[in-house]
Each structure stands twice: as C-alpha cells, then as structure tokens.
Amino acid sequence: MLNKFAIILTLAMLINPNALFARGILIPEDKRIAPLILVKQIVDFKIEDQIAETMVEQVFYNHSDRPLEATYIFPVPKGASVNKFTMWVDGKETKGELLEADKAREIYTSIVRRIQDPGLLEYMENNLLRMRVFPVPARGNQRVSVSYTSVVPKEGDLMEFVFPLKGEMRSNQVAQEFSLSGTIKSQHGIANTYSPTHDINTQRKSDKEVSLSLNKAGLMGDKDFQLFYSFSDKAVGMSMLTHRPIASEEGYFSLMINPSMKGNKAKPMPRDFVFVMDTSGSMRGPKMEQAKKALKYCINSLGENDRFSMLNFATSISLFRDEFVPANEEFKNIGRKWIEGLDSTGGTAIRDALLAALEIRGNDASRPFVIVFFTDGMPTIGETNPEKITRDVLAKIKPNTRIFTFGVGDDVNATMLDMLAEKTKAATTYVRPAEDIEIKSSAMVSKISNPVLVNLSLTFSPDIQVLDIYPTSLPDIFEGSQLMVFGKYKGKGGSAIKLRGDLANEKKEFVYEYNFPEKTSDSKSFVEQLWARRKVGFLLDQIRANGEKGELVDEVTKLAKKYGITTPYTSYLVVPDHVAYPIHRPVPGYPTPKLPVPFGLLPSSGGDGNRKVLEFARENQSRPGQLAEGRATAAEKAFEFAGIAGAPGAEQLKKAMDAKGDLDRAKDALRRRDQNAVQGGKMGVDLSVQNQNFRDQITVSETAIKQISGRSMIEVGGVWIDEGFQKSMPTMVIQAQSDAYFRLLEKQPQLRKLFGLGNYLIWVTPGNTALVIDTQEGKNTISDKEIEQMFAPNK
C-alpha cells in the first residue's frame, strides 16, 4: 500500500519543497537529536533612513528527556552590513560571534549534511551569528534573543530590507506564536513601501513615518521577508524596479505610485453618486436585509460636499429622487427611511436601471459621477442580452463616470459586470453565497470614499520603448492605496517618465528621471513573474469575452507554462494552498530521521523497493510534453489518497482537487465557445475572480514550475524534472549531500538555487548532460574535469 504520510508530504511539497531549517535554529551537540522545534518567534525592526535595528526573540522546545548543550545560529541577510549585535539567553546577555561567509559556509555545509535538507544552501554566501546555549532544559522551552544593527542596501532610489523567514511554513517549524512588525522613519517623505514576498499591513502615520506588520496568517510559502522602500518629498512619489538578466532580451519594470499624505489631506473632491439596488424576488430574505445595511453604509460614507440619489429596480424602476440632493444629515435621514421601505419582488430590469441612473446626471460632466450598482441576478426584463446591455450603457457614458459593480451570489453575468467597471476605470466586487453583502460592500465603499489622484496617464521618453503595460488603463488612486504598474521595455539608458492626473481638483504633471538598465542581476525576478500574471489575466478576459482564438490560447499557455500559472489551460499546475505538513519529530536517543521519499518514487502496486529518480523521469518524459500529463496523473493519485480520513492536509488538498476540476470544466466550456457558461453563473464568477486576482497580484505565489538558470523545472510526484530532459541524454547521477554534491556546489555556486529545490531532481547542464540528484544512488566523488565537461556549453 502506498505510504499515506509520503503522499501528503509530496502534495505539500508543491508549496514548500525546501528548507526545513533556514532561519535562526538551535542545534543540539548530540548528533542523534534533530534541531529543536521553534514555538515562538517575534521580530521587530526599526529603520531610520538607511540604518536598521532588528530585534528577534525565538523560543525553542527541547523534546528530549535530558538537558542539552546546543549551538544557536542565525543567518545574516545577504547584503546587510552588521556593525553591532547582541545576543541573550533567557534574558541574560551572552557572548556570541559573527562569522564571515567563508567560515560560515563550513557551518552551513555541516548542517545540510546532518539534516539531509538542502534549504540552507541558499545562505551559504551569507554571514552568520553563532552562540553556545547550555543547558537547554529537558522537556522545556529555551528563549534566545538577537539584536543587530545593519546598513540597508540601496540600489538606485530603493532600499531593500530582508529578514530570513524560510522554513516558517513547515508545520514542525511554524511557531505557535509569530509576529513581525516594524517602522520606517526618515528626514524625507517616504514615497513607497512594497513587499513582493508577503501581504503586509501598512499604516502611514505621517509622510515621514510608516508602520508595517505581518502575522502568522500572512506567511506565504517558503520565502524570506523582503521589503522595498524609497524616499521623496514630491506630492506624488514614484519608484521603479527593473529586471533584465539577459541583455539581448527585453527587460521588465514595475512602477509604484503613491500620493503623499499632504495630497491626501487636500480638500476632498466633491462627487455625485447614484446607488442602484436590485430588489427583484431573488433578493428576498437575509440577502435583502444585508443589502439594506450596505446601502445605508454607502449613504453614511458620503462627504459634506457630495450629492446623491438612489433607485431600486425589479420589473420596473423606482427613484428616490430624479435629481441629486445634497449629502447633508437631513437628506441622509430621508434616504435611510426610503431604504427601510424597500421590498423584494419581480424580475430584473438591468438595462433600464442603469440608463435611468445615467439620466439623473444629465448633461453636467463637470463633477465626478459614480454609480454603485448592486445585483444578484441575470437580466430578465426588457433587454436580456448582456453584451447588448453593456454596449448600450457604455454608449451613454460621459467623461468622469465610474461604475462600481457588486455581483451578489453566483447567478450573475460576471463578464457584463467586469466590462462596465473596467471601461469606466472602476472595479467589480463579488459577494459569494457564504459571504456577507454588508461586510464586502462596506470594505469597497470605504476604499473608494476619498479619491486622491484621478484621470491618470503615463508617458515615457521616446528613446525607451515600453510595451505590454498593465493595467492597460490606469485606475484612480484612493486614499491609503498605492498603484503598481508593470510592463516591458526595449532600449537602455535614462528616461523621463511623465505622470499626469487630477490632484485636489487641479490638473498636475509630475516628471521622474529613471535609468532603464541594459542588464541587471536575477535578484528581482518577481517583477517579470508579476508582469506575466497581469498579462495572463488580461488575455483570459479577452478569451472569455470574445471566445477562443488560437493565438490567444497559445500565448496564455506559453506564459502559464513558463511561469507556473494555473489557468483553465494549465490546470495540472494547481498548487494546494497552505497545506499543513505532518510533524516528523525525532525520537530522543535515535538519529535524526531522514525525510520521506517523494510519492512519485514509492513502489507501484506490487512493486518491491522505491524507484530511482532517473527511472521515474524516463517514464514521465518519454516524449515531449509528457511531464504535464505525468504531473496531472501523480496529483490525481495523491488527491485520491489525501481523502483518507484523518490524513494531514486532506482538506487543503481536497480544495485543490476541486479547483482543478473546476478549471478543467472551464477549459471545456471555453473550447465549446459556451459563452453563457464562462460569462455567467458560478463558473463565470470563478473565472472573473481568478482573472481579477491575476490583475491585482503584487506578491509572488508558490508555483509548480521554477526557472533555474534559464531552465524550466516542473514538479512531478515530488521530483523536480527539467522540461528539456530527454531519456536518451547522457547522465551524471550524484548522491545528495555526498562529497561530490558539495564539490559541485563549490565549483558551480549557482547550483545552490537548484539544489534548494530538494534531494530528488534532474537538471540539464549547459553541456547537455542530465544532472541527477538522488538520495538512493549516485556518485560520492567527482573530478573537476567531469564538472568542467558538464558545464562546457555544447557547440
């Protein structure tokens, strides 16, 4: 029978295949005992301009029955120049040492050999802090604290602060108590703050002080915490990130645009609102009561200079007023009473309702005009063709009009709602059946209540060619929000970027000078990855709205395969979300346990002994493109076994299995050109939400495909296989953590990222040799000549 533990671990590896112990760890001197389990981690950092003081408190649990002597090590973030550090054990200052990278490399290597996990390899060029800890109480906790001061590295106008968090997602290493918080202060205005790795909470206390926080729920995948920030005293701050590791290819860039708090505090922009509420029969019951509360919240949020009206629709239209009224307390009270009298009955006259809302504005286009549209159904009265309704409404739109749409439930035409919002530079919010209308709508209304910078446009100097910019139409920037723009570029050198828009009711132009480099390091690959997600979201919207076209499907599939993006055309790349790892605790007095063999290498039914990596890869790549099928088959088998009652992570894996099924059904509907299915109902809303997530994504998610030194690696059954691998290739099989393994790392240090994927992989070298890493077989020694031959480019 297949080993259930290994199956679940394999699916979990889709999220986090590497480091068990990649940040501060406590290692017993007794090699029979594994590194101790982290139960608490509190991180606090204070940054003033470019100087960061970081305080870390960690609590470890000694699972053995006796006191232990141990060594604590903490990787210093790469690039951080530590000029002062202090270490404590149980509150008492203790002598520690700072080891430079050359000496630290020996420590990292010995730990990787011991725990047989390659996660620390990425830190092999980093300095480390080390101290002895004794005694660690039996069956007790050990508190360790570290404080260090460092200079934050700067490139261009951006500072980059990093804190090691790799390994936090493993269940035997996720601290029961975790928090990370910090502040940034400066003599200048803080223009932008951005983390590509984690979803952080940001609060601006002033233009010169920002606080940030991350809790356990915000941990995403197996990544160090990375934070970029910049300074500017302009009314609107802009920062740029670039990525161009290959000079002969196009580069990628990201712009961060953020108005200062001075701009935010300018006199609020007066606006006119019409709130349009669906009161058809399907809204009856709790849904209607929630909708009434949501509508009251909208009225309460209006500013003193705003004006408003309302209408409800079912079979016919009913107006609160046929003209705008001031948003003073008198009319707000009248409006709230009108809302209380609403009842649900009849059909759904969407076209008539939206056209009636536009009529209230009349010909006056001087003030910004906002329609907030709530509906829970398809059009059933009057014009019922969603495409025709969209055309008719957009034809009546005047400048400075925004239509924010709310789709309540799954029985809506998502494409129609998306188009109405997108074409007017607004947004769509979907309230799924289990969600509360009031909560979702109030969050959106709060966000859009104070626009700061509107009617935006960007232009670039002609010597730099920019292309594929997303979003294609720049939305408004609201108080407390930051706009991120992604694109590609050709050319090199300095460029003036002009940002035009309306700030505090005045037309403004801001000019920024930036350098578009000919070549960069590979450290900001997230810029390219996030650009790809935005483009895929845009292309999928085109396919869903207009039907499949071969060139669009080909482009989506190409991008999705390269960047590991799960789409209806690449459902085999689905990655389970936050799978809980089974805790593989060591038994006191026994050697550190080996990590289980991946699911794909377990013996097949009736088989004897585990399969080898090379054998498994040849089976799954006997012809081009077969790896995708192999991954899908392995995932389906593992999903099937994950359903076993009590299996760790079964719930998350079941969700992933369901998501894959939904994507497969969506692909079938798209290929049948079944527009009703892909634009409306649950499938339509699911696709809309997925595409919206692609368009809005600012943090890099875990994927089943990794780009390593220009090669695409795909995870199949827990084994990482180069997509370019062919069964006829010459091979070099190396045993994981052997002398040969570390000699390869010494001579070819770029392999650290590759080996960090795990102990079971195949990668095609520049010499067109399949380099195989396996724990079960392989060479223990290798000559420098053999290494040179593998890495000499094929002529």
Image (tube, rainbow, N blue to C red):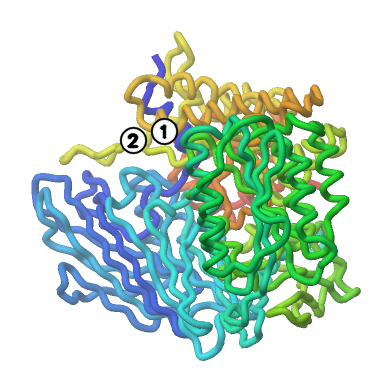
Which residue is at 78% across, 65% downward? Answer: 400
Q: Residue at x 79, y 53 (%)?
A: 423
In the rendered structure, which amino acid carries the disc numbered 1?
Leu
- Density class for disc 2 (Cα within 10 Å; few <14, some 14-19, many ≥20) is some
**At 38% from the left edge and 44% from the top edge, which residue is drawn?**
116
Image location (x, y in percent) of residue 647: 35, 26
Q: Position of residue 497 (x, y in %)?
A: 79, 77
Compared across the picture, whether 505 is left or right of 41 comes to right
**Residue 517's quadrant in the figure?**
bottom right
- Quadrant where the image shows the N terminus: top left
Q: Could you tell me the amino acid type at mark 2? A: Pro
Work out whether 283 lies above or below 255. Answer: above
Residue found at the very far right of the displayed protein: 462
Reading the image, the residue beneath label 2 is: 582
Tell me if residue 526 comes above or below residue 589 in the rendering: below
Residues at marks 1 and 2, CA–CA distance in whole angstroms:
7 Å
The numbered mark at residue 441 is none
Q: Is residue 141 above or below residue 268?
A: above
Looking at the picture, how far across and down is residue 688, in whole percent? 67, 40
- Judged left or right of residue 215, residue 778 is right
Earlier sequence position, callout 1 versus callout 2: 1
Question: Left or right: where does residue 585 sit relative to residue 2?
Answer: left
Identify the residue at image location x=50%, y=58%.
Answer: 199
Tell me, yes or no, whether the two marked residues, 1 and 2, touch with CB atoms within 8 Å. yes
Rendered position, 47 above or below 188: above
Farthest-out residue, bottom: 187
For mark 2, give the secondary structure.
loop
**Viewer-proximal residue, 66 or 330?**
330
Q: Quadrant of residue 575?
A: top right
Q: Which mark is residue 9?
A: 1
Q: Nearer the viewer, residue 560 or 213?
A: 213
